[in-house]
């Protein structure tokens, strides 16, 4: 028993975090498989397309923490490496998050009717969209989730990211438990808003509990402002926040473009198979997220060789996962459609799977180098290339999708990566290592 305890204590903590994330993802993947089928049966193909479009907006809303979570994570990692207290940054993060919540909810109440009319213009014949401001309601839930999810970054900085991995998975399990009776007993009165609330409120509750726990001592000092800590956190946060918003613009335009250029069947097909590939990417992404604080601490201590080896291993691992997964998804694509969308007319082709494979390989490549650069606060490079990437993506994906449908969306995304981040991020990484090694 003592030997097991010693082994566990010696095992790299970031691998423990990654292992917990993989375990959580197995649960999440299983639940998502059932939920797609259940939601399609509950909503029908057209209403499910609206559900998918609105849920895709969650990524945009999650950027509204203005990078405070990422900045706080790095400040905590830096303080830990120097054995310093980070309480002042915790208190400042709480103050900023509360202020941001009220600001963005007020703005949302003004712009959400316009957003719903424009983004869902092809689906305004659905009665529910004519009577309910769904984006306003769900957007408020998304904003609250964005602010409370700051706590997840705190746990990653403390190398307790397994908490941040397990809680969202539990929230999804709770959502699945709730959607089953809704599909069984209320199918005739299927509501897009009900489905969205079932899959968003549990995530908010799961983030809210640790938020209260982590910041409980700060609530009593909520009006005690540390101007220096607020300034440092906000300035660094804005740098991260600007990057996150631009990255979202480069990566999350697909559903917005599809809402104008694709039919419900195409959106449903894209949604199902993108989720399968995102599951593969998540396997590598969880390892990168867990390694963020490790990379930050290694760089602060000057251990550049260890970082290089870590990046190389993650690239090989991530690309292998995507290739193997792509082969499996294509071979079992018919079975996947039969299980997930039995009452729809969707289909999948080899070119579609090949495009997904290439796109997610590029995502692994850029995510790996991006993790390192963000962990050392090298954010300027992202501000330089991401606006260009977003522009290339928007133009190419829109015009290609008009001719090639969802295949055109993927082709546009691939082009935006090849001409920008796939070149610039590894080049910036190489320059940083070269300059540090020359100084040494």
Image (cartoon, helix red, strand yellow):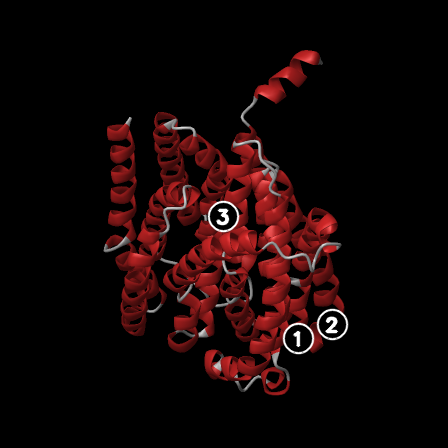
Report if residue 206 is visible in the image: yes
**Viewer-side residue, 70 vs 144:** 70
Q: Residue at x 62, y 21 (%)?
A: 9
Q: Secondary structure at mark 2?
A: loop
In the image, taking residue 253 as reference, residue 412 lies left or right, namely left
Asked if residue 332 is positioned above or below residue 105 in the image, the reply reads above
Q: CA distance from mark 3 to mark 2?
A: 30 Å
Q: Residue at x 46, y 82 (%)?
A: 118
Report if residue 145 is visible in the image: no
Q: CB atoms at circles 1 and 2 under 8 Å apart?
A: yes
Q: Secondary structure at mark 3?
A: helix
**Viewer-side residue, 234 vs 358:** 234
Q: CB atoms at circles 1 and 3 under 8 Å apart?
A: no
Q: Quadrant of the C terminus?
A: top left
Residue linked to disc 3: 279
Residue linked to disc 2: 186
**Viewer-side residue, 79 vs 154:** 79
């Amino acid at each position: 028993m003592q030997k097991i305890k010693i082994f566990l204590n010696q095992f790299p903590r970031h691998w423990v975090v990654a292992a917990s994330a993989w375990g959580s993802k197995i649960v999440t993947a299983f639940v998502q498989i059932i939920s797609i089928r259940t939601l399609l049966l509950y909503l029908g193909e057209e209403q499910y397309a609206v559900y998918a479009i609105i849920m895709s907006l969650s990524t945009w809303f999650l950027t509204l923490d203005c990078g405070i979570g990422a900045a706080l994570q790095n400040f905590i990692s830096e303080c830990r490496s120097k054995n310093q207290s980070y309480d002042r940054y915790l208190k400042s993060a709480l103050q900023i998050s509360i202020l941001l919540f009220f600001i963005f909810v007020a703005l949302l109440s003004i712009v959400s009717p316009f957003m719903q009319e424009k983004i869902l213009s092809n689906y305004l014949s659905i009665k529910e969209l004519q009577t309910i401001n769904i984006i306003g309601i769900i957007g408020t839930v998304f904003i609250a989730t964005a602010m409370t999810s700051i706590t997840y970054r705190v746990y990653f900085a403390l190398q307790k990211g397994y908490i941040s991995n397990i809680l969202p998975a539990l929230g999804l399990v709770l959502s699945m438990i709730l959607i089953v009776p809704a599909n069984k007993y209320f199918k005739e009165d299927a509501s897009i808003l009900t489905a969205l609330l079932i899959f968003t409120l549990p995530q908010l509750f799961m983030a809210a509990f640790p938020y209260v726990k982590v910041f409980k001592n700060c609530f009593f000092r909520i009006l005690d402002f540390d101007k220096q800590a607020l300034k440092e956190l906000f300035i660094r946060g804005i740098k991260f926040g600007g990057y996150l918003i631009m990255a979202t613009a480069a990566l999350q335009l697909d559903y917005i473009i599809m809402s104008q250029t694709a039919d419900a069947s195409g959106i449903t097909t894209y949604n199902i198979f993108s989720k399968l590939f995102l599951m593969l990417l998540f396997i590598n992404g969880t390892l990168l997220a867990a390694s963020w604080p490790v990379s930050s601490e290694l760089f602060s201590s000057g251990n550049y060789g260890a970082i290089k080896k870590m990046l190389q291993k993650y690239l090989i691992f991530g690309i292998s996962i995507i290739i193997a997964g792509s082969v499996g998804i294509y071979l079992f694509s018919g079975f996947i459609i039969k299980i997930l969308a039995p009452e729809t007319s969707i289909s999948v082709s080899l070119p579609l799977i090949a495009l997904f494979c290439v796109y997610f390989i590029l995502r692994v490549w850029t995510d790996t180098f991006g993790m390192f650069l963000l962990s050392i606060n090298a954010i300027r490079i992202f501000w330089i290339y991401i606006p260009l990437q977003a522009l290339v993506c928007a133009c190419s994906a829109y015009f290609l999708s008009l001719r090639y449908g969802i295949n055109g969306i993927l082709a546009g995304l691939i082009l935006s990566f090849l001409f920008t981040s796939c070149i610039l991020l590894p080049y910036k990484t190489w320059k940083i290592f070269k300059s540090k090694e020359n100084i040494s």
